[in-house]
Image: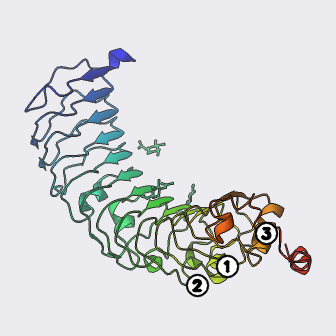
Amino acid sequence: TEAHHASCESRGLNKVSWGFPPRTQVLNFHGNNLHVIPARSFPGCCQVVSLYLGFCKIYKIQAWAFRGMRSLKYLHLSDNDLTSLEPEALVGLPKLNNLHLEGREPTDTIPQSLSLVPNLSVLHLEQNAISRLQPAGLLSSAAPALTNLYLRSNAISGIAKAALNSPNIETLHLDSNRLTRVPSDALTDTPNLTELNLSQNPVQWVGPETFQEMSHSLQRLYMNRMGMAEMSKEVLLSLGPRLKVLTVRGNQLKTLPDLSPLSGLELIDLRDNPLICDCDLLPRRRWMERVKLDVLGTCGHPVEVKGQKLMHTNGFATCPENNLRRTETDPV
Ligand SMILES: *[C@@H]1O[C@H](CO)[C@@H](O)[C@H](O)[C@H]1NC(C)=O
Ligand SMILES: *[C@@H]1O[C@H](CO)[C@@H](O)[C@H](O)[C@H]1NC(C)=O
Ligand SMILES: *[C@@H]1O[C@H](CO)[C@@H](O)[C@H](O)[C@H]1NC(C)=O
């Protein structure tokens, strides 16, 4: 396959050079100084599947820039200087599936031009300056086939109602943004949402019905370092039996609610919380043992057991017999 790979990486080029073998499938211009991609920049590149244009100081892509690239599936445009994308910048790419637009692109919104990319399924927009997600129905109209959307490390503080609704979205990463609440009303019609990352947003409090609409599909939920001091049983009820993975690492949790509504749970990550490993927590640990849950977590208090693994601590050894007996009759 080496023969099908053409590389002009970091050559100081200021325009796209031509004349690659017609069977070229991977074309790499990473790290040049292209600035502008004019119309029809890639003639004769109809077999190229992956095109790398990262770190090329591109600030403008003209309409029909990629015309003729009928086989293109992966387009890497990360770490450029794009402020916007012209509506027709990405037209004529019927197979484009995976688009990288992350890293220091000074764009403030999701480009509307994505509506013209019919088969786009994976969109990377991490580490940009996106602060707004609007208007309603953005995703279903902007990228009809989108299944994975990555928005880590932007400046998102609010999401318009229904902005993320999309019948196909499966993986949504909103981690490391500025959300102060879980954007439930932006996710009312996402029947296939299985993975949601909300870590490192200053959410602090998660209301009882937060995940109601997502409970039919959600399997993996990441809520690390959100400043949460408490989780209620109601929240867990709204998550329900489909959930397999829950991470709440690095919060302020001292106690845990009854976890039994999460009957499908396989892994819980409780690390870096000030959990109080006293007799009140014992019923939770017994439940975890009974259902053979994978548990990551250590005790924070009392001081004698600080740092011990929750599943191996001897902090419960002195709990009175009656306490043990009571937990044994807890409903499974
Ligand atoms: C669209 O993408 C899917 C994979 O996500 C692929 O199976 C399908 O063939 C693509 N459609 C076109 C027209 O290339
Ligand atoms: C959910 O995804 C499946 C394929 O994984 C697809 O067949 C189905 O149409 C999707 N649901 C909706 C409502 O589009
Ligand atoms: C979720 O987000 C956090 C914070 O950005 C990140 O460290 C973690 O890797 C993410 N988890 C997954 C499964 O993507």
Q: CA distance from mark 2 to mark 3?
A: 30 Å
Judged from the image, the secondary structure of the residue bearing numbered disc 2 is: loop
Judged from the image, the secondary structure of the residue bearing numbered disc 1 is: helix
Q: Quadrant of residue 19?
A: top left
Whichever of callouts 1 and 2 sits on the residue coming sooner in the sequence is 2
200 vs 45, left or right, is: right
Judged from the image, the secondary structure of the residue bearing numbered disc 3 is: loop
Expressed as whole percent of the image width and height from the top left, the position of residue 194 reads: 56, 61
Label 3 environment density (alpha carbons within 10 Å; few <14, some 14–19, many ≥20): some
Expressed as whole percent of the image width and height from the top left, the position of residue 29 reads: 21, 31
Expressed as whole percent of the image width and height from the top left, the position of residue 13 reads: 10, 29
Ligand 1 lies in quarter: top left
Q: In this figure, which residue is indicated by the disc labeled 2? A: 208
Nearest the camera: 263 or 114? 263
Under 8 Å from ligand 3: the CB of mark 1?
no
Expressed as whole percent of the image width and height from the top left, the position of residue 107 reads: 20, 60
Q: In this figure, which residue is indicated by the disc labeled 1? A: 237
Q: Are marks 2 and 3 in contact (CB under 8 Å)?
A: no
109 vs 218, left or right, is: left
Q: In this figure, which residue is indicated by the disc labeled 3? A: 316
Q: Are marks 1 and 2 in contact (CB under 8 Å)?
A: yes
